[in-house]
Image: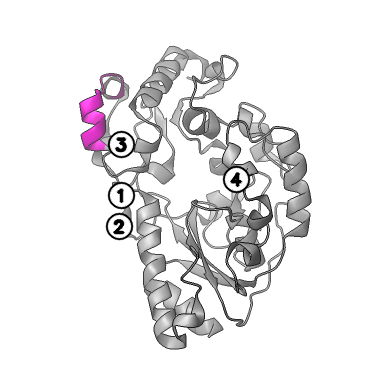
Amino acid sequence: MHQFIKQTALSVGFDACGIAKATALTEDAEFMQQWLYEGKQGEMHYLERNFEKRTDPRLLVQGCKSVVVVLMNYFPEKTQPETAPKIARYAYSEIDYHTILRTKLKKLEDIIIEKSGSESVNSLYQHSFVDSAPVLERRWAERAGLGWIGKHTQLITPGWGSYCFIGILLLNFETGYDVPVANRCGSCTRCIETCPTNALNGKSIDARRCISYQTIELKKTVENEIQPLLSGCALGCDICADICPWNKKWAKPHIHPELKPIEEILSWENPDWQQLTAEKFSTTFRSSAIKRAGFGKLKENIAFVTKNKEKYD
């Protein structure tokens, strides 16, 4: 079943798949407790809930024995005009990536059930996840042999880099498991040095200082200290990923038609973004991940970026 699952994952449209044995992530639990104690999660209080389940999938889904991890490359062929407020690459697509990955995960699950029976999953619990439950996706991807977690806290996958979405499917049977790969960051600290807000320390991220957090997760206005440091980023940030030597070597355009980019993102210049109305926002980004930030937050971020443009020109 091990190879069958991995080959099936590729056949339904994922770019990579690995499988890890379900167990408690003891070291991660200790690290996360300290991270939360220090308040580095900012206002993302959902990270404080279901703590035990977050670090042990067997507590999340009764009977869980295996963690299937899938990856989907989202690196785009084209990027925005240089003058435009920057939108993180993950949000380029017309359709929210959550929807795309959930659909593919369901296809994978259905084929596994057809092969191994309905007891393969516990239908009484949610057992497939895309940023939607207490699952440490990156750590499980690492455990499943799909790469290593870099100093920018992102998964780096050999042959792909770190521009990959991660999906999780929890199974109630044992199968073969993949072997983790070695961390290959070595002495490189480019991501740490390049982060304009000093959010990285090589071991973790202070979300409160992260541009992605400030421009999306933080429901209030971007903090005064961070506003001049946005470096052109209006929604999300790819700075630490862009500078990574492994991404320079491995990142390549995806081949997924489902991730077709929103044309306006690729064509709008700074004035177009400044003139964006609520109505245009709703129609242009109606099925996009950009909607999550909201019109007001995005427009506010664009104003900060425009105001401080001379600081990063």
**Image point 75% across, 36% down: which residue?**
37
Majority SS type along the magenta span? helix
Q: Amino acid at mark 3?
A: Ile
Q: Which residue is mark 4?
A: 244
**Image point 57% across, 71% down: which residue?**
18
Q: Which residue is mark 2?
A: 258
Report the front residue among 197 and 49.
49
Q: Amino acid at mark 2?
A: Glu
Q: Which residue is mark 3?
A: 265
Q: Amino acid at mark 4?
A: Cys
Nearer the N terminus, badge 3 or badge 2?
2
Q: Which residue is mark 1?
A: 95
Q: Nearer the viewer, mark 1 or mark 4?
A: 1
Badges 1 and 2: C-beta atoms under 8 Å apart? yes
Q: Secondary structure at mark 1?
A: loop
What separation in Å lies between label 3 and label 2 (alpha carbons)? 16 Å
Report the front residue among 247 and 120.
120
Q: Nearer the viewer, mark 2 or mark 4?
A: 2
Q: Secondary structure at mark 2?
A: helix
Nearer the N terminus, badge 1 or badge 2?
1
Badges 3 and 1: C-beta atoms under 8 Å apart? no
